Image: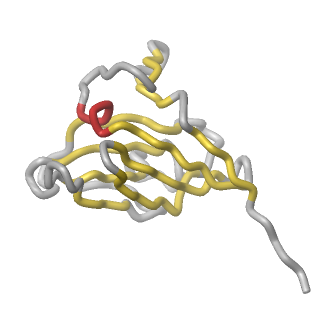
Amino acid sequence: GIASPLSPASIARIPSTGDLLMVWNNNGKNQHRTPLNIAVSKDEGKTWQHIKTLEDDPEGVFCYTAIHFTGEDVLLSYANWKTMGSTIVRLPLKWIYKKYGSGVEQYDQKDNHIRPKAFTIYCQLLTVND
């Protein structure tokens, strides 16, 4: 099973392949909302592959995810409590399926994570008082 004890995983079917895309905090059984990962299942969720890390700040809090497919890309949005805003990331589906993709990702040899380095938009959350 998938362990994501504090935040629920978001799962959506990739329209072009029928596979499942999952966004979750791949953190075992601890109570943190970091790291934020994506993975693909080709067997209805029995196994997961193409696991990539989107955020891994140990002090970060990444949650409330949303998934939207548009053409050959996927838009992922999630709350980022450290910046007190939302992050929207546009990822090519080809990148998600590559084992060690090229293009928007950055391979970090220090921690063996692949992270997108482009297409990130920070949106400020506004509070309106009467």
Q: Which of the pair 77/48 is nearer the observer? A: 77
Of all residues, the one furthest to the left in this rendering is 43
Of all residues, the one furthest to the front in this rendering is 71
Query: Which x, y percent locates residue 9?
Result: 37, 60
Of all residues, the one furthest to the right in this rendering is 130
Can you tell which quarter of the image residue 4 is in?
A: bottom left
Of all residues, the one furthest to the top in this rendering is 109
Residue at 42% over, 25% down: 113
Number of numbered discs on residues: 0
In the picture shown, does residue 85 fall above or below 121? below
Quick one: quadrant of the C terminus?
bottom right
Q: Is residue 12 left or right of residue 10?
A: left
Q: Is residue 15 left or right of residue 69?
A: left
Residue at 33% over, 55% down: 3
Residue at 31% over, 22% down: 101
Q: How is the image coloured?
A: secondary structure
Quick one: quadrant of the N terminus?
bottom left
Q: Is residue 57 left or right of residue 106?
A: right
Query: Which x, y percent locates residue 39?
Result: 29, 44
Query: Which x, y percent locates residue 112?
Result: 40, 20
Can you tell which quarter of the image residue 18 is in?
A: bottom left
Residue at 29% over, 20% down: 100
Query: Which x, y percent locates residue 84?
Result: 73, 55
In the picture shown, does residue 18 fall above or below 94? below
In the picture shown, does residue 63 fall above or below 57? below
